[in-house]
Amino acid sequence: MKRYLAGLGQNERLLLALGGAILVLAVLSFGVWLPLDTRVDRMRTTIGDQRALLQWMQTSAQEVRRLRQTQPRQPAEHQSLLALSDRAAREAGLGPAIRRVEPEGNDRVRIVLEQAGFDDMTNWLEQLVNRSQIRIDNVTVDNRPEPGLVNARLLLQAPAP
């Protein structure tokens, strides 16, 4: 390699050095600088998106807190779970469908419905969960030949104190 360089003229060596410098600059630019710059731009975009998401979540959390404070809750402590679930089922129009309501321990109730209206049952369960904070532990629903009617077995649990 030294012989080759020694055999070159002054202008050729200068041209070769200039070409080498340009090659080194191109490798640094395209191999190091541009990938880092692209990654930094992507990170800036991601940070902006994450900040927007954080702002939305904080606003939503405030809205949820406000709605929880304004939504009337009927605490289940004033009535037993057995009485509350039975009364709510009858108010929802499920009285004729109730076949059995039996306690399972202190904080659970098993309810059996036959030929219950599916819409009435889902509205009743929504009321129990949203207003009375009762948890649904288990639900088994069997369809009936009549449209809109179901047989159901439910296990409900009282809210934690």
Image: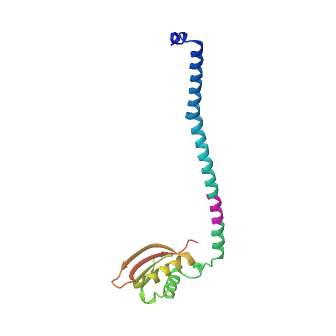
The spot of residue 119 in percent (x, y) is: 45, 82
- Which sits in the foreground, 68 or 81? 68
Q: Is residue 50 left or right of residue 7?
A: right
The secondary structure that dominates the magenta segment is helix
Left or right position of 38 against 119: right
Q: Residue furthest bottom?
A: 96
Q: Above or below — where is 102 with respect to 137?
A: below
Task: Give the quarter of the figure containing the C terminus.
Answer: bottom right
Which residue ends up furthest to the left in the rendered image?
Answer: 145
In the picture, measured across the screen, residue 20 lies left or right of residue 156, that is right
Q: Position of residue 11 (x, y in %)?
A: 59, 15
Residue 104, image x, y percentages: 45, 76
| Residue 17 coordinates in the image, percent (x, y) | 59, 19
Residue 61 is drawn in which quadrant?
Answer: bottom right
The residue closer to the viewer here, 68 or 134, is: 68
Magenta span contains residue 126? no
Give the residues drawn in magenta, as a range: 53-61
x 61%, y 40%: residue: 37
The foreground one among 139 and 68 is 68
Q: Is residue 59 magenta?
A: yes
Identify the residue at image location x=51%, y=12%: 4
Its colouring scheme is rainbow
> How many numbered markers are drawn?
0
The residue that appears at 62% across and 51% down in the rendered structure is: 47
Question: Vertically, is 145 above or below 26?
Answer: below
- Residue occupying image coordinates x 51% and y 78%: 126
